[in-house]
Image (spheres, helix red, strand yellow):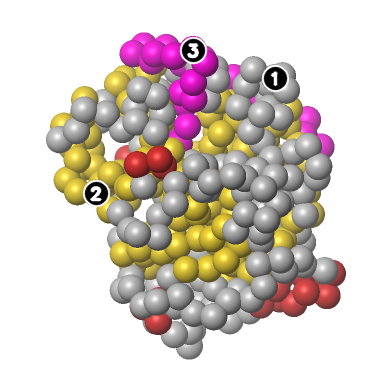
Amino acid sequence: MTRNHPHPHHHSHPGATPSPSRRAVLGGTALAALALAAGTGPASAATGAPAGAPPAGAWPTEFPLPDGFLPEGISIGSRPYAYMGSRANGAVHRTDLRTGAGAVLYPGEAGTAAVGVELDDDGLLYVAGGGGGSARIVDTRTGHLVTTYQLTATSGHFINDVILLGDRAWFTDSRDSVLYGIPRGRARATGGRGEIRGLPLGGDWVQTPDVNNANGIVTAPGGHGLIVVSSLPGRLYHVDLTSGHATELALKGTTDVSNGDGLLRLGRTLYVVQNRQNLIGVFSLDARLRSATLHRTITDPRFDVPTTVARWDDRLYLVNARFTTPQTPETTFNGVAVPL
């Protein structure tokens, strides 16, 4: 699932700080206070952090999520707040990266899911709806649902991740060889009535039956199309948004990116989260977008099936989905930060 944000972000590695209750639920008063806190303080042009804030190296590198939250997506915008989606009920949790404290921003709804998430500059959060086949838009300023787009049928599909490019938000469907684009921006996100564009994938794209295919998605360098990872057998593709033609990237230094999940691109460096391998592959993209060369991997003892990644300063922030652990209402979850 994942990400390409222009602001500079980077990190050292102190231990986790004391955290609030995992079961914090945001009431109206707390929501107003959190929204106010998120909007106050002038931003520093150099770091994107509020003026007077402690350096990111002093911030916690681990933060709790509610028990049973079932996190998967994470997005960070131009301010130090992480937004994470819940597969349990479609809720969205917001964490202050400076303190590790957080609360549920949007409570979700029974029978829905929030998988990949992506924050726009205008405060709208675009949410991939998983097996429900939907795309939702949540207003992070109010915590309210703005609209829902039904992209696919509610069976046989899995809307997995999302990225923003131009006037659309683009979503992957892990069970079908199609990308979906919905209108982007407050002026267009009204009532879910805007045009949904389906873009069938062709060219080199291989759709393997009965497994997750298209997963994480990011913009290509220069905004020239999109890069999509197919989780199994583990391939990277460059997708032309005019035709849907997918060109497989030749991998160098590794044979595959199996279990490829969230993506993050910084210039020509592509970070690929491989969830069940508990690692991030760091690749360089060639100028013609024909190959990706593995230069190193990032791992950490705290990784517990991380799924998606976002950046702030010199840190990468990930959520642990814990897919190999029983997923119960009592299962604990967290997010972690590692050096970029």
Most foreground residue, 74 or 203: 74
Q: Amino acid at mark 1?
A: Ser
Residue, disc 2? 297
- State how far apart marks 2 and 1 are (Cα): 36 Å
Image location (x, y in percent) of residue 44: 45, 77
User: What span is in magenta?
Assistant: 190-219
Q: CA distance from mark 1 to mark 3?
A: 15 Å
Residue at mark 1: 155
Q: Residue furthest bottom?
A: 52
Q: Secondary structure at mark 2?
A: strand
Spatial separation of the CA atoms under disc 2 and disc 3: 29 Å
Percent from the top left, x then y, of residue 43?
A: 51, 76
Quadrant of the image containing the C terminus: bottom left
Q: Nearer the viewer, residue 87 or 44?
A: 87
Sequence-wise, the earlier of marks 2 and 1 is 1
* Disc nearer the start of the sequence (2/3): 3
